[in-house]
Image: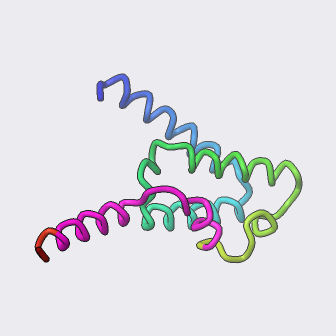
Amino acid sequence: MGIQDIIEGKKQWRAHVARIKALPPDYRIVYKEMQKYLFKVGPVGLADGPLLPGIVDFFEEGVAAGKGVLELIGADVAAFCDGLVKDSPTYADGYRESVGGESGAHEK
């Protein structure tokens, strides 16, 4: 990763944060909770993948349609997030595989 990549990444992140700040307060609160949850769950490639910008796109569409954030995602934020990443590999999956693979080698 070169300097240009780092600079471009920072520009993209700042633009992303500006989009979040432009959302109504209830949307911002829910977005931050979703972001915290997703960083704990740990889908691989979260930081530079399409998931977080996709959530902002979805939220901006909800705002434009005049809907409240909970009308879009429901009352259970964690369940909504789980649905978003259900088919995505997570860091926990990788850890389980590495531990499972090692234990299987020791059993022989």
Q: Quadrant of the N terminus?
A: top left
Residue 32 or 77: which is nearer the viewer? 77
19, above or below 33, in the image: above
Find residue 26 and report its horizontal and vertical position in percent: 71, 65
Task: Residue lying at the far top in this picture: please name it.
Answer: 4
Question: Which residue is depicted at the point 45% across and 66% down?
Answer: 41
Q: Magenta: predominant secondary structure element?
A: helix
Task: Residue lying at the far front in this picture: please name it.
Answer: 108
Q: Find the magenta span and give its range.
A: 79-104
Task: Residue lying at the far right in this picture: please name it.
Answer: 66
Q: How many marks?
A: 0
Question: Which residue is depicted at the point 81% across and 53% down?
Answer: 63
Residue 67 or 21: which is nearer the viewer? 67
17, above or below 93, in the image: above
Q: Is residue 44 magenta?
A: no
Asked which colour scheme the image uses, the reply is rainbow
Q: Quadrant of the C terminus?
A: bottom left
Find residue 77 and report its horizontal and vertical position in percent: 64, 71
Q: Is residue 86 magenta?
A: yes
Question: Which residue is depicted at the point 49% across and 65% down?
Answer: 36
Report if residue 29 is visible in the image. Answer: no
Report if residue 74 is visible in the image. Answer: yes
Q: Locate residue 97 relative to residue 16 in the image: left or right.
A: left
Place residue 100 in its image quadrant: bottom left
Q: Locate residue 89 relative to residue 68 in the image: left or right.
A: left
Place residue 3 in its image quadrant: top left
Question: Which residue is depicted at the point 57% across and 37% down?
Answer: 15
61, above or below 40, in the image: above
Find residue 39 and report its horizontal and vertical position in percent: 44, 61
